[in-house]
Image (cartoon, rainbow, N blue to C red):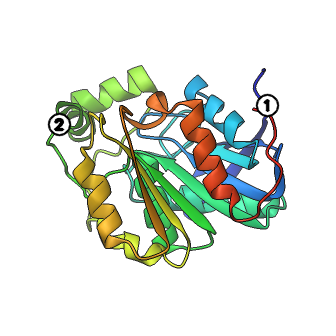
Amino acid sequence: MPLAATFSATLMTKDGVRIDAAHTPSRGDAGLGIVLAHGFTGSWREPTTRRIAHVLSGFGGVVAFDFRGHGRSGGLSTVGDAEVLDMDAAVVHARSVGYARVATVGFSMGAAVAVRHAALHGGTDAVVAVSGPARWYYRGTRPMRQVHWAIEKAPGRLAARLAKRTRIRSTSWDPVPLAPHEAVARVSPAPLLIVHGDADHFFPLEHAHQLFEAAREPKELWIEPGYGHAESAATPDLVRRIGRWISRLSPAREVDR
């Protein structure tokens, strides 16, 4: 089946950053919008993210976007801090095109942003955090040590810009933003779903458990056997199960995906 049609959009954040976005209209519940947030160095234009948007559009309309410093969006990446403003712009856009209920789905860095956005800005009816970190500065795996090299060192930032079109701010956080495990309790009363793979090579399961233990009800934790990390490892079956979980907001006929 060909991917669902998408319509490009340009959003503006409250701090004046232009955000490249796309709207995939709902093929399921016309009143449900899903804001889809990619991981670090990702983009809504990548095939993996577009396939996820296509599957989710069987349950509700999807607004996908590029975080600041990524792809065709403006600004510089702050790796999870100011990105809450990018997600807020996407949530506002989803409301403006007519979705009465809006859920956010974030992968990896996007998961951290989804949690922090719901805690700090609200305006969401459900939150799904997939493969997300619980805390900052984690270097316990080789991939995360490589990520920190890309963020903290000038040669790493150059490599990220040339290879992945990701422009990263050179200055460090000041102050350090509220970490996901510190923010997650504020997501309630919106339902929270935490999804993590037992084969995640970036963040081990301790991150998922730390988030879940700090969260308040209503909450669910799915530990997925054999699942790796973020968008690239997400199967259509897993994405459909996430879509069904979100659709509990307003049960509607499921369409073919």
> Of helix, strand and loop, which one carries label 2?
loop
As drawn, the residue found furthest toward the left would be 140
Location of mark 1 (residue): 4
* Residue at 30 percent of width and 39 percent of height: 198
Q: How many marks?
A: 2
Dot 2: few (<14), some (14–19), or many (≥20) neighbours within 10 Å? Answer: some
Q: Which percent across, then down, holds residue 71?
A: 54, 33
Give left or right: position of 197 versus 11. Answer: left
Q: Are marks 2 and 1 in contact (CB under 8 Å)?
A: no
Question: Quadrant of residue 81 in the image?
Answer: bottom left
- In front of the other: 61 or 254: 254
Dot 1: few (<14), some (14–19), or many (≥20) neighbours within 10 Å? Answer: some
* Residue at 31 percent of width and 52 percent of height: 133
> Of helix, strand and loop, which one carries label 1?
loop
What amino acid does circle 1 point to?
Answer: Ala
Q: Which percent across, then down, holds residue 85?
A: 53, 61
Is 126 placed above or below 7 here? below
Q: Quadrant where the N terminus lies? A: top right
Q: Which percent across, then down, holds residue 56?
A: 68, 42
Give left or right: position of 182 versus 100. Answer: left
Location of mark 2 (residue): 141
Give left or right: position of 110 versus 1. Answer: left
- In front of the other: 140 or 168: 140
Is 19 placed above or below 202 here? below
